[in-house]
Amino acid sequence: MAAQSNLKNMVICLTLTCLACSAVLGGIYAMTKDPIDKTNAKILSDSIKAVLPEGGELSEAKVAGELEYYEYLAGEAVSAYAVKSTTSGFGGPLTLMVGVLPDGTVYNTSVLSHTETPGLGAKCTSDPSFTKQWKNFPPEKILAVKKDHGDVDAITASTITSRAYTEAVKKAVDFVKTLAKEEGNE
């Protein structure tokens, strides 16, 4: 005899289906959590290495407001900072690791994550003319795209992403300048 279609049977059936799906999702989460955490840690570590000069010792992560940063020590003195900076790009959050020297020079940048449009804004990770300009970007240059009277060459057809990238770098540089002033006053 077939089960009758009534509210009680529908609720039981839906509940069992939800429990089974939850168990499967929970199991998959448990199986993939460690590999995902390890991959994210490696991405972070590689990104920090890419934005800092060689020959120093990295501090533990520090947090100030919404920014996470690392001090790079050469002996007792801080020789550089690695700052994790996030802004909103065209497709959503754009997160960078920015290496900044105490004088405000951008040593280098690295994209940690983005949701930019493939083939356009996603070029922030691969367009050599865009990515190379950040290596040793001097503090006397203006951190704004050329359309906004700055010194940054934007990615062709991706002004919003270029502005967001530049804003993330500017946020990191301003933060390091604030840190340098605080350390100088102590």
Image (cartoon, helix red, strand yellow):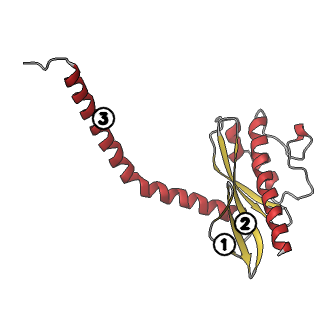
Say the numbered circle drawn on residue 161: none
Q: Quadrant of residue 88?
A: top right
- The quarter of the image holding the N terminus is top left
Label 1, label 3: how many angstroms apart (C-alpha)? 46 Å
Total number of numbered discs in the rendering: 3
* Label ID, residue 52: 2
Instruction: Give, as a three-letter code, the residue at label 2.
Output: Leu
Instruction: From this view, report whether residue 184 is shown above or below residue 46.
Output: below
26 or 122: nearer the viewer: 26
* Residue 83 appears in view: yes
Q: Amino acid at mark 3?
A: Cys
Q: Earlier in the sequence, mark 2 or mark 1?
A: 2
Q: Residue at x 76, y 68 (%)?
A: 80
Observer-side mark, 2 or 1, equals 1
Q: Secondary structure at mark 2?
A: loop
Residue underneath mark 1:
58
Q: Is there a contact, CB below 8 Å, between mark 1 and mark 3?
A: no
Towards the viewer: 44 or 177: 177
Q: Which amino acid type is marked by label 1?
A: Leu
**Mark 1 residue element:** strand
Q: Earlier in the sequence, mark 2 or mark 3?
A: 3
Q: Residue at x 73, y 44 (%)?
A: 127
Q: Residue furthest left?
A: 1
Select label 1 or label 3 by which is in front: 3
Image side of residue 52 versus residue 27, left or right: right
Q: Disc 2 and disc 3: Cα gap in Å? A: 48 Å
